[in-house]
Image (tube, coloured by chain):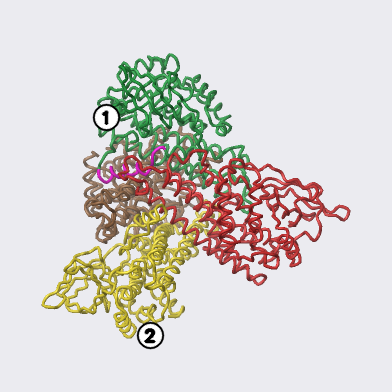
Chain colours: A green, B red, C yellow, D brown
């Protein structure tokens, strides 16, 4: 994946982003553009035809895509998260297998792992494992080649497994219609007597089964931070273009050009400073995550905990920044920027929807519990 | 207009508000509900079949309507503003004439007064006055019975006049399609050789032609403040219902019900305290405006200036509060409140669009110029 | 108390406020000025030589004094609170007795009621009641004529009583030395075998013994709000004078006078708008408190609860405003305003210290519990 | 300078910091501790007995010292700034000379360079250059060995020169008495017929005489950012200790220990997240400054400009963070933390005074002018 290829992909996504925000649904064409770009293999090791990029590059790519289309950035972020999950929860053989087919067939992974939704179960019937039930918030499941799923087994333990999206009994519904992140396909998936093979279950060490495995939620969270940053950056960029090409000075501002209005300049300065701080913090967290990742099974709970704290701080700050920038861009563009044809509200809608994934107040509590009590965050699927 | 009638109107508007936000366009049916409610006559003197209500009641009514439908509240606010404008810019005879027909025929007024848009002119041709040109941001013009228009005469002076919406040569376009305030019909009006009669021109004292006449922009601004407050109140109310009926406690919050989550409670407290302050300030400004209004031609520039400052402060605070509340309600409702079917983002979209009417930074400058330099705001169409 | 007398008192207090902030300790001379001003009788009924002023005027007076000296305003606020407490917790005969001597002898009351400090007890020895123990945070106790005290009796019940400050066994220590509110004398009082007479005990209905009696904490809290407002107003006033007389435009601001700097104007505007909202909210709460007060024993828990919510909101907003204004005045004055001789940091220090009286987070929780759950605040000594 | 030595120096400074904040004046003893620590040579090249540390380490050291004593950190920051100024404004020979004597004699430099104060002049009398006039805000001038001074020559051009502090005619007044940064000795210096030698003048390229030379104000600004960060970190650290050792849960918080109060935890989390973002941004800026520094005369205006923008953003964010943290620590400590003996208000007073050095609004304008107009900041003594 060259810088130029990423640039061209961004251009193409940007051209239709406003229109597709209106349409919602599955972005089949754009998903194909992503397939064609090679980005699906960005994180894969070289032996599996991958680019072997490290986390800072991976997250930066997610952020870049998010600056033009945060729905597809979310889906792409899940591609990397799911591949990492296979690494973290499964055996080396499983990684080798799934990475090989992903690299070879350029597979797109979708998500059906959602630990808070406990309506899916795995039961053993006549020696076969069968999956039944529903899952909500299954981002990127439609038009996917493989799914990462979660379900409770007969002992009530959480299983995570990787299966083909086309397996018999799986129905991926086109029922995501929300106010933002409209092309993430985060709808529901239904499982009806779906066969599950033992070697598809990632159980060694399994979900959060080791300190290393507990990096999984941190990767998810940091991917989200980069999406919020991308949204903020994209919004600011659109605002600059609009102000410069269509903005007008206020009638009694005393300046001839809006670009010299002291209040417009100050507001741009504020947004820019906030974004800069959020970027620095988030990039730092990516470096720390990479270092933790490279520790593998040597990763200590303390190292993992510090990494979690860095990412929690990034979550807090990027959430705040994303919401602030996407709302305040209108103050520097003015009323005419609200025409529906531009759909410039989508930046706010996107970041508003996504930042509700898990409550930021509990990230603040985690941070406070460290500062005050030196308690590291307990690994869960959200921290 | 009884409290109960207002309550019933609100209920009806609320039922379809989300759906109509999606549709945009002209709310013919709901405009008729307003006509039928008697609200169009709320501010008219009793001799013209009016309710003779004072500004505090009028603005409170606008706010109440805004809590369920801020588009129609905006149009209704313009009804009162336009009737006041006739009073402020015209002769007693003109008031008597226009008020009488408004009271008798239950007329709905639309706006085509926009001083920053100078593309409309009045010229004298063969002894007749003819209006030609375009106007943008003409709120409530569609489906209106009368229009208040502005145009430049041959000397470049601003004329304001009241004419029938159905007059030959007037085209009211259905071209308002914005991200918020979607049923305000704030589109464009085209004038093509439209005849204007002398006695339709409000020229005594004319636009901002006296201290009393310069109350006009203050009435407009205070109407806006009440719309922002209404949006905040409506948003908070929806949030409470959603949290209580559909909210779930966060999995590691340690509480069994979301209604006991300390962070949820604190956030509701913050939103509520901000709204309370904004209400107190705005209601105060309405009392002061009423007092200024009652001064009539005895109103001094100092009294008018103090009133302008009160309303500028209310504008600043209600803008901030409206934006904050409509965005943060999601933090107390959670991700499921983002389903498109509820369209709960409309509160933010509505207040975001409307608060761009004129830049709040220049209201802050006005306030500062008073505090520091004891300069009262210069009357313009925006302050 | 005429407006002019209040003005003159303020002038005198202002002249030495900075110097006395440095000294700390007891403001004997200024307490005497307050005695001489007649302000100690402001709230007393006319039959006791009082001015019979209502709560809005009383709180406004506290605010005015706080704008020049928030320590003395605090002590004066306690005078009114203590007199009200006698009314609320005691019998009509007790009110008559204590009000009469207060009116006649111009008595200054000090506070030794502190329910969270349980180190003081009342025991019966040989038929006499004896007070023993310590109290902290006893505002205005030094140089006082009478004290309102709290203590636990042998059953662990809270007693409140009114006694002469000079009674044998009472030691009022000069041990208040804090970073703000330095002349509130909020030090400790020691009781050593102090005799207490039955008719000094306010036990009918006693502490928070009725809905009406539970107005006591609300009066205290609203007095505090007015102190924070006074601090904000005083700080802003000093800033204006400083900017105008000593401020200089920034070298590359492009303006010749600091009074025209767009950013200085905007900042003044922001501070002013926040203060205006806080004033409106607080004045509203005072009207509601007066209405509740006039209900007397007819006051319902619902009415009391609404009043508590109004005051909680005022507490939240005035706390925020006081802290913001007292810190940000420096941004409009510049570095030279930090000279120690002016001691302009005292506004922040004063409001910072006082706003810690009870945590604002729990006021937010109370407000949220109302909005979300329709639970009115439970009456305690703090809400 | 080892980590341990820095730790020990911090411990010693911390022990007396509160007391010395009260005293103000010159910290002779502590200045000697700094001399003894070796820190004066931290930035000097190895050939001059220096530690040859790079900017990230230098600024980190300033920050560490600021966490316990921001006055001395300011003076130490000036040591590094002045040595860099000699490098930037003078000839290699001048650097060699002044660095050699600094390294050999462990010299402490004080500041008398203040371009906005134009009361000092250099005139040529009988072939000698003589300095006359006054300078204000001369940080660290007292007890210094050398001074960096600025003055206007007969053509009105700014001269910068390095002279011994003990030279005849120099009077360094003990007249700094401000509300914060009380031991920075930022008082006035008087020059009375002070001889100036040609080779003491740094005129090649002279003040901001080249792109490289214009790094000087950036070094100053970044030093300030690190002081604000140090103050925030020091304040937070004190707060944690206080909360844990002396904090008490609020009576109706429902928790037994303050360390479990959800609101206390959330507040600590907020302060911590803000600090983390500010650190990341500031550390990033230091890396960029180091890279710019290493460019030397190859530094392009674009590179310099980007560096200026990074530092402006850091200034904005650290200012906000420093003020916020130093004020809000009290909310997590409670009223008893306001005892004067602890002088915990000094964190706020210190950061409040220092952040007025130059107005942050103009940094925001600079940032906005870049984002919107792609104008890099014009090099001045402040940007």
Crowd class of label 1 (few under 14; some 14 to 19; many from 20; radius 10 Å):
many
Q: Is residue D240 left or right of residue A283?
A: left
The overriding secondary structure of the stretch rendered in magenta is helix
Q: How many marks?
A: 2
Q: Quadrant of residue D215?
A: top left
Estimate the x, y position of residue B80 in percent, counting from the top left: 65, 59
- Most foreground residue, D274 or B284: B284
For mark 1, give the secondary structure. loop
Circle 1 is placed at which residue position? A211
Estimate the x, y position of residue A229 in percent, counting from the top left: 45, 36
User: Quadrant of the image for the C terminus of chain A?
Assistant: top left
Q: Chain of mark 2?
A: C
Marks 1 and 2 in Cβ contact (< 8 Å):
no
| First to last magenta residue range | A357-373
- Magenta span includes A360: yes
Circle 2 is placed at which residue position? C47
Query: Going 34% across and 58% down the picture, which residue do you hit?
Result: D172
């Amino acid at each position: 994946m060259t810088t130029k290829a990423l640039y061209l992909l961004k251009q193409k996504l940007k051209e239709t982003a406003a229109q597709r925000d209106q349409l919602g649904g599955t972005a089949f064409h754009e998903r194909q553009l992503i397939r064609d770009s090679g980005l699906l293999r960005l994180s894969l090791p070289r032996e599996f035809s991958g680019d072997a990029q490290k986390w800072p590059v991976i997250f930066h790519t997610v952020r870049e895509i998010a600056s033009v289309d945060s729905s597809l950035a979310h889906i792409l972020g899940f591609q990397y998260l799911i591949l990492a999950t296979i690494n973290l929860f499964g055996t080396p053989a499983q990684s080798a297998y799934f990475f090989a087919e992903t690299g070879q067939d350029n597979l797109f992974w979708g998500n059906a792992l959602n630990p808070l939704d406990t309506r899916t179960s795995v039961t053993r019937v006549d020696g076969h494992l069968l999956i039944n039930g529903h899952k909500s918030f299954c981002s990127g499941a439609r038009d996917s080649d493989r799914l990462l799923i979660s379900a409770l087994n007969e002992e009530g333990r959480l299983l995570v497994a990787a299966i083909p999206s086309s397996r018999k009994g799986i129905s991926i519904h086109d029922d995501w219609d929300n106010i933002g992140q409209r092309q993430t396909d985060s709808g529901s998936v239904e499982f009806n007597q779906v066969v599950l093979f033992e070697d598809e279950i990632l159980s060694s060490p399994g979900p959060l089964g080791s300190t290393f495995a507990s990096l999984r939620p941190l990767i998810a969270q940091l991917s989200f931070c980069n999406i919020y940053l991308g949204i903020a950056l994209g919004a600011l960029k659109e605002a600059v273009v609009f102000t410069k090409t269509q903005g007008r000075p206020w009638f009694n501002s005393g300046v001839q050009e809006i670009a010299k209005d002291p209040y417009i300049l100050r507001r741009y300065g504020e947004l820019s400073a906030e974004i800069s701080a959020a970027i620095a913090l988030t990039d730092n967290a990516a470096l720390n995550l990479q270092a933790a990742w490279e520790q593998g099974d040597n990763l200590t709970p303390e190292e993992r905990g510090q990494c979690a704290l860095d990412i929690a701080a990034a979550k807090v700050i990027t959430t705040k920044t994303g919401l602030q920038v996407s709302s305040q861009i209108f103050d520097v563009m003015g009323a005419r920027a609200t025409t529906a044809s531009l759909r410039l509200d989508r930046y706010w809608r996107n970041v508003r929807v996504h930042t509700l994934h898990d409550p930021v107040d509990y990230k603040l509590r985690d941070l406070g519990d460290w500062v005050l009590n030196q308690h590291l965050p307990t690994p869960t699927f959200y921290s």
